[in-house]
Image: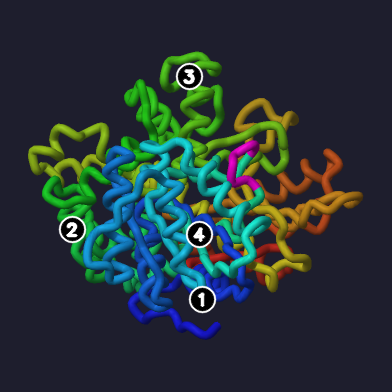
Amino acid sequence: MSIMKPERIFDRDADWRALVAFAEHAAPEPVLGVVSGRRRQGKTYLLTALAEAMGGFYFEADESTETEALRLFGAALARFTGAPAPIMFAGWDDALDHFFSLARERPIPLIIDEFPLLMKASPALPSILQRHLDRRWHVDREPCFARVLLCGSAMSVMGRLLSGQAPLRGRAGLEMIVKPLRYRSAAAFWGADDPALAVLLHAVVGGTPAYGRQFVRNDAPDGPADFEEWVCRTVLNPQTPLFREARYLLAEEVEARDPGLYHSVLGAIAAGNATNGGIAAYVGRKSAEIAHPLHVLEDCQLIVKDCDLIQRKKPVYRIAEPLIAFYQAVMRPRWAALELGEAERVWRGSRPRFLSQVVGPDFEQICRDWAITADDVFDEPPGEVGSALLVDHSKRENNKIQLDVVVMTPALLGERQRVLSIGEAEWDKVMGVGHLARLRRARELLTARGHRAEETVLACYSGAGFDEDLREEARRDPRVLLVDLAALYG
């Protein structure tokens, strides 16, 4: 890679390498790339840095009519080329001819950010772009080094750009989703050296870079003792942008006719109702009536539909953005008091709910994220990681065993998957032999039901530690694994 990543860009090494490789592609023909990702993840930061480093063109669309968009596009092109006056275009055909002409001599990134806003004003724009790409690929003989990058935060729109019968289907040489920082990178971004503080922070703001910079003006907790005061002075403070961010995220991503229903669905998931039936019962609707809101929220990547790794036909839902889970569990029930500046009082009453409904589920997901990369821990590389619910029919009471972390080998044709590990995760409880006994019973049930689980590792994940009896069991049995905060963040 000939162009180094600017020091001001935190992490994102793989994303930067992919963008530079795309932009430096030497073939004398245009290449199309699509960059998407939820808002506040730093897409614009990456793309403007790429344009600056390679002398490329960058244009950010906004809400406008087609006529005004063309006028703004022409003004941006004039500034880029040094033209004395804005360039006037009769339509997008004319504009794209000029756009592609910028790259006649060398590879150059030509970036259009917030592309869905242009599509909203000009629905035919993808078809027009397809025509220009096809013409330069198959008809024109003149070299064209255009490296066209379309970017957008409207995930449902960007997801359809290259799918099905869409005009640009099959035309892209790059499809990149800029995701939130992974949990270890998020801890480093916030400067959270204490793993317990890192978990608490992640449960509130996840891995979204903007929340640590613009939204709280680089205000990070000064150690674990400062966390609760930090919550009150930032996310629960109506004078900070972070206070209303969860509401804005839903409004920006979902053009909802019934916003109350969407908030109720998210509230149901945040309260621990993970199945379609559980969510429907919580919001007081039939399962069929919440199918569309669930699909829309999933399409926008605000929620994720996971599969119970044991009962494959039973999907479970979880909220993808921790800040939304925090809002639904802590802020939404006491919104009026928070708007009056009662952050400390609201937090005191909401803290138990924060630990059980926000930190607990987020900690489980952190454990699953750790397990999927734990190639040196298990005797085979993990292929799938998720959760599962087992029912022990031999008992009349307490017959459900929740497995928070289930690790499977890759699903290969002709081979039965092995259950590499099953585990429980407890954020704020010291784990003991009772947890291990439950996991051993779960392993027996899996084996009896035909799963390859004889050698399954039994894993206990804890943010509070393990008692001495459990540690002794782990010393005696190599198939007992104890994972603490030091291991998760090591």
In screen coordinates, is 292 left or right of 351?
right
Q: Which residues are magenta?
A: 164-169
The 10 Å Cα crowd at callout 1, few under 14, some 14 to 19, many 20 or more, is few
According to the picture, the residue beneath numbered tag 2 turns out to be 229
Label number found at residue 105: 1
Residue farthest toward the right in the current orientation of the protein:
414
Name the secondary structure under disc 1: loop
The residue drawn where x is 28% and y is 71% is: 82
By secondary structure, the bulk of the magenta-drawn segment is best described as loop
Q: Secondary structure at mark 4?
A: strand
What residue is pinned by disc 4?
A: 462
Q: Which residue is mark 3?
A: 281
Which of marks 2 and 3 precedes in the sequence?
Answer: 2
Q: CA distance from mark 1 to mark 2?
A: 57 Å
What secondary structure is found at the residue carrying circle 2? helix
Q: Residues within 10 Å of mark 2 (few under 14, many from 20)?
A: some
Q: Amino acid at mark 2?
A: Glu
Between discs 1 and 3, the one toward the N terminus: 1
Cα separation, mark 3 vs mark 2, equals 36 Å
Q: Nearer the viewer, mark 1 or mark 3?
A: 1
Report how far apart the C-alphas of labels 1 and 4 lie in the structure: 58 Å
Q: Quick check: marks 1 and 4 in contact, CB under 8 Å?
A: no
> Can you say which quadrant of the picture contains the N terminus?
bottom right
SS type, badge 3: helix
**Relative vertical location of residue 6 with respect to residue 219 in this rendering, above or below:** below
Query: In the rendering, at what x and y percent does residue 132 appear?
Result: 55, 52
Q: Crowding near pointer 4: few (<14 within 10 Å), some, many (20+)?
A: many
At x 74% / y 65%, what residue is drawn?
Answer: 381
In the image, residue 309 lies at what x, y percent? 69, 43
